[in-house]
Amino acid sequence: VQLRASGGGLVHPGDSLRLSCAVSGRAFSTYTMGWFRQAPGKEREFVASIRRNGGSTYYGDSVKVRFTISKASAKNTLDLQMNSLKPEDTAVYYCAAGSGIILSAIKTETAYPYWGQGTQVTVSS
């Protein structure tokens, strides 16, 4: 499984940004996929995830309402639309994939064995 995140950049508070994760092969339709982030000096944090059929989505408390996770079948990409960005959203964002993830583990990074390389998002005035 190969994942490649892109779309990061430097934005101002209140701006929007869309991240994409290119997904190889069968993983796109068979795996649960998610986004995590890691700020300097902090542990990796769950952001959002989506089930393989796109029917269920889950969000971290700090990004609910502002962020939307989705799958673009035509492009085989996992997307994260981020609105109303705040300085505390500054982090390296990683996409991840895994199979057979039970609900109680959906926000746990160790449940996702496959990871992309990360893309930097910086929110600053």
Image: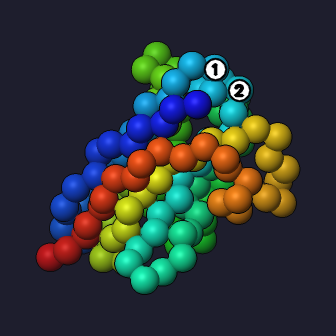
User: What's the image's color scheme?
Assistant: rainbow
Tag 1: Cα neighbours inside 10 Å, few (<14), some, or many (≥20)? few
The residue that mark 1 highlights is 26
Check the image and report above or below for 110 versus 43: above
* Residue corresponding to mark 2: 30
Of helix, strand and loop, which one carries label 1? loop
Residue found at the far top of this picture: 74
Q: Amino acid at mark 2?
A: Thr
Image coordinates of residue 11 in percent, x first then y, are: 19, 62
Quadrant of the rendered image containing residue 107:
bottom right
| For the residues bearing labels 2 and 1, Cβ distance under 8 angstroms | yes
Is 104 placed above or below 4 here? below
Q: Is residue 80 visible?
A: no
Residue at left offset 82%, top offset 40%: 100
Residue at horizontal 43 percent and vertical 31 percent from the top:
22
Residue 102 horizontal/vertical position (percent): 85, 50
The residue that appears at 60% across and 26% down in the rendered structure is 28
Identity of the amino acid at label 1? Arg
**Is the N terminus in the top left, top right, bottom left or bottom right quadrant?**
top right
Residue under the point 34% across and 53% down: 119
Q: x, y (%) of residue 49?
A: 62, 49
Q: Residue 55: image x %, image y %?
A: 71, 35
91 on left or right of 97: left
- Position of 12 with respect to 30 (left or right) is left
Relative to 84, residue 77 above or below: above
